[in-house]
Amino acid sequence: MQAPYTNDLIHESSPYLLQHAHNPVNWVAWSQKALLKAKNENKLILISIGYAACHWCHVMEHECFEDEDVAMTMNKNFINIKVDREERPDIDHIYMDALQMMTGSGGWPLNILALPDGRPFWGATFVKKDQWIQVLNQLQQLYENEPNKIIGYATNMHQGLKEINSIFAESSVQNISATTLAEVVTTWSAYFDTYLGGYKRAPKFMMPVNINFLLHYGQTQQDQMVKEYVATTLTRMAWGGIFDHVGGGFSRYAVDTKWHVPHFEKMLYDNGLLISLYSKAFAADSNALYKNVALQCINFLKEELLDENHGFYSSLDADSLTPKGTLEEGAYYVWTEAELKQLLQEDFNLFSDYFNINSYGYWEDDNYVLIRDDEAASIAEKHNLNTNVVVEKISKNLTKLKTQRQLRAKPRLDDKILTSWNGLALKGLTDAYNYLGNSDILDLAVNNGNFIVNQMLKPNGILYRNHKNGKTTISGFLEDYAAVIEGFLGLYEATFNLFWMDKSVELTKIVIENFTDPKTGLFYFTAINGESLIRNTIEVADNVIPSSNSIMALNLLKLSKYYPEESYQDRLEQMMGTMHATILENPQNHANWLHVSSLMNEKFYEVVVIGENYERICKKMQKSYLPYTIFAASDVKTSEFPLFKNRYVEDKTMIYVCHNGTCHLPVERVEDALNLFT
């Protein structure tokens, strides 16, 4: 049947925008044309921001934006702009800051009313129909009758938005010391949930950036308390319902304290970061659980998010259709006891103990979310079975569940491809290859890297942000460049193909030329010659995803070791000096910066392997957890690459372990090389 309404979003490629293309609301996408229309007609702008996998965005669409009465109010008085936050994080940053200033909290859907020039004056997240109409009418009347009140508030809000994003450079500030880092971690540990992992709160977000720093800190400082906390968190997350035991991959967060019931959307960025984290954790302590989780997450990417051209899609929705044809959150993932008994037959009791088909694993409406709470050995002992037998039986049972689940209606796929998220996934894959050693993972990584080069990179070296149906439409933001540079540096250390190093350097030069804030040494989120908004954000806070500036700091740290004659170290030190006070003000929100500080304090090594057997030697060394090390390797006799000069020895493969350009005598055995890390 033909839809009764169609608005301007029908011409967009974003799945989120297309979801609203048949609303009776006269939605338009963000554009200069839309803003000019608002100014010419002196109409307020209603900006509604969300994303395709957002459950409450769907609820508000159904209750409000599909309603004709609501649409009549919105269409009469406002220019209605829909924004996909994943395509336009630059817009989302600004108006999320505004909402948090107004209300003290944030979230999506993010609904903002702004003056015709884009300056915000009111905001809210989910709003019910009657309240929504009432608020819109009241604010429109106020704008008509007392516009100066709204203009004054918007003016103050605009000034506040600029001030909260201001960072002032400090002169002669040293890097954060090891002593201060220890004090930070001690204070931070008061929030640790040492029994269930994560923080002592609900909902629980996985925060891979924070755990990655703490993993590094615990290992390098031999802090037993931190190591145990990291192990508990990684184990409980992997045991929890937040991890999809049937199909692999993590959901976005858990609504409870025990990682049980997730908010069921599955995002590429979470899984890319967690592949990296679990692979590193496996290298650090050889826990097979971590390796299995990383491999299952990779399998999820391959099965559910991989485009035929080797890019990765963005997400799977939280909602899916029930057998009755209604959209419900988690419908694809949950099980009733009756279903499991019918599927598993004589194995049900074992499976029930393993995944808590009891009060501990119960969710709602007769549904269970699979969750572990004990080691396989304990379950084996209870059932008088060998542990390996239990693991094998559970694996076979999960395969049965997967086959059955594939008969259900799948969650909706957000099939746009985002450059930055692909960069994060690429880095995760290169870490997984280095630490787990599976050549299939390297193939997946190289193919994804080639996709980014061929589809997301313009001939002049400028990156695009998004890709859908063969089209790219938005210029890249700092997070796109930062994540891709990091991913390409990872690809270099996985392949030792200088093509990836050269691309990293080219993209870094573009960032320096087009994004630099000369006052602070930090980088703007939008290129200096990019689209003009009411603020050019400088993103520094590390959240679930590391901030674009902290990723760039880490990139500069690595590049300074590969190219010591360049100015990368100077730029890094300026950034760290600028950020010094901000990091210490709120360390938990700057964990990737803490990671960079820690690396700058430690003895950082350059490992150079030259000779015919360089690949075998590097793969053996890279399986060790050496987080303060870069690798460079080749079999060429002569090269202009700085770390290769004058190091080739005929008929031998030599390993050089260096620190700040000063090297130990070269050795030929991996064991001897590892002994030089002191």
Image (cartoon, rainbow, N blue to C red):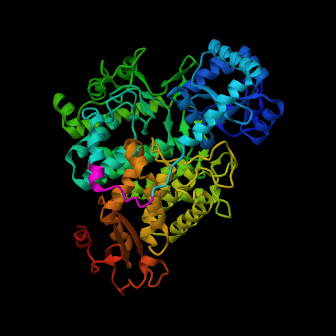
Q: Quadrant of residue 6?
A: top right
Please state if 541 lies on the left or on the right of 112 as rendered: left
Q: Foreground: 588 or 663?
A: 588
Q: Is residue 618 magenta?
A: no
Q: Foreground: 671 or 125?
A: 125
Task: Please determine whether, in this image, residue 651 is positioned above or below residue 241.
Answer: below
Counting every numbered tag in the picture gives 0
Q: Magenta residues?
A: 171-182
Check the picture and name the quadrant holding the C terminus.
bottom left
Q: Quadrant of residue 648?
A: bottom left
Q: Which residue is pictured at 49% across the width and 44% down the height? A: 269
What is the residue that sits farthest to the right in this orientation?
40
Residue 299 visible to an observer of this rendering: no
Q: Is residue 181 magenta?
A: yes
Please state if 67 lies on the left or on the right of 603 as rendered: right
Q: Foreground: 526 or 266?
A: 526
Percent position of residue 7, x then y: 77, 29
Percent position of residue 33, x then y: 79, 40
Percent position of residue 327, x then y: 56, 21
Percent position of residue 20, x then y: 69, 28
Residue 644 visible to an observer of this rendering: yes
Check the picture and name the quadrant holding the N terminus.
top right
What is the residue that sits farthest to the top in this orientation?
130
What is the residue that sits farthest to the bottom in this orientation?
650
Q: Which residue is pictured at 52% across the width and 66% down the height? A: 500
Please state if 66 lies on the left or on the right of 664 as rendered: right
Please state if 72 lies on the left or on the right of 500 as rendered: right
Q: Which residue is pictured at 55% across the width and 57% down the height? A: 519
Q: Quadrant of residue 58?
A: top right
Task: Please determine whether, in this image, residue 224 is positioned above or below residue 53.
Answer: below
